[in-house]
Image (cartoon, rainbow, N blue to C red):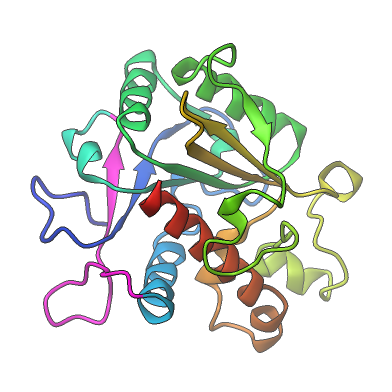
Amino acid sequence: MRFAPPEMPDRNFTVCRIMYTSVRREPSGGGWRTDYPFGEVNLLIRLAELTKTPVSFSGGSKRPNQWVVRLTDDQLFDCPYTVASDVGTMGLTQPEADRLRLYLLKGGFLWVDDFWGDRAWQQWVGEITKALPPAEYPIVDVPLSDPIFSTQFVVTKVPQITNIQFWRGVGGTTTSERGEETREPHFRAIRDKKGRIMVVMTHNTDVADSWEREGEDPGFFFQFSPSGYALGIDVLLYAMTH
C-alpha cells in the first residue's frame, strides 16, 4: 500500500484509491481494499497502451503509480481521479464528507463500483448525500446516449460483471450475484451545476474485476474484460476532458 506522497512524482495521470471506514459488512466485500491494487494498475496500463494519455510510472518501472488517500489528506487535491469500491459498507464523518464535497466541486472526479443490492445502495446514498445534498445534486441514471459512453469506445450497454469467484462457482451461467434483486446493473451519476459528471456509480456490477482479474482465466477475460476496459477508458477520458 502506497499513500499519496506530499508531492506527486510528476504531473502525469494517476488514480487515487479512497481509504474509508466500513460501518457494515457485505457478502464477498473487502471494504476499501476491494479490487485493490490491480484494478487500478491494470486499467492504467491499458490506458497507456490504448490512448496517448501520459500515465505516471515509477522511474524505470513497468508498474504505474497509483496511490491511497484519505479524504482528510491534503494530497486528495493532487489526485485527478479517485475510486472507491464496496461503498455499501462506507461510513463518512461530516468532516470527511465536507472534504469530498470540496474536492468534487473544485473539479475532482470519483467512480464508485462493486456494490450490490438495495441495502448497499441505501447505505451509499445515505453517505454521499452528506457531501452532496440531493436537492442540489440529484443522483440520475445516465442514458447510453450520453457522451461519457463514446469518448473513445462506443458502449451500447452497461456491462454486468461479476467477481471471478462467483463466476467460477456458477460455471458462468449468471452474472447477477444476488438473484432477482441485482438483475439489472446501473450506471448513475451526480453532476455539478454546469452539467459535468463528477461522481459515477456502477451498481450491481463489479467493473473493476474485469481489470483486476484479466490474466487469471481466459474465459473470464473474453466474457468481461473487453467491455470492462471499454467502459473504464471512456470514463477516464471523460474525467480528463471535462
* Whether residue 25 can be seen here: no
Q: Residue furthest right?
A: 180
What are the residue bounds of the magenta stretch?
52-71
Give the quadrant of residue 87. Answer: top right
Residue 58 % position (x, y): 16, 72
Residue 139 % position (x, y): 63, 28
3 vs 155: above or below: above
Judge from the rendering whether residue 236 lies leftward or rightward of residue 27; answer left or right: left
The answer to whether residue 10 is magenta is: no
201 vs 40: above or below: above
The answer to whether residue 63 is magenta is: yes
Toward the viewer: 135 or 125?
135
Q: In the rendered image, which quarter contains the C terminus?
A: top left
Residue 90 % position (x, y): 51, 32
155 vs 71: above or below: below
Count of labels in the image: 0
Residue 186 % position (x, y): 72, 45
Toward the viewer: 8 or 117?
8
Q: What residue lies at 75% left-to-right and 69% top-to-bottom?
A: 167
Q: In the rendered image, which quarter contains the N terminus?
A: bottom left
Give the quadrant of residue 52. Answer: bottom left
Give the quadrant of residue 103. Answer: top left
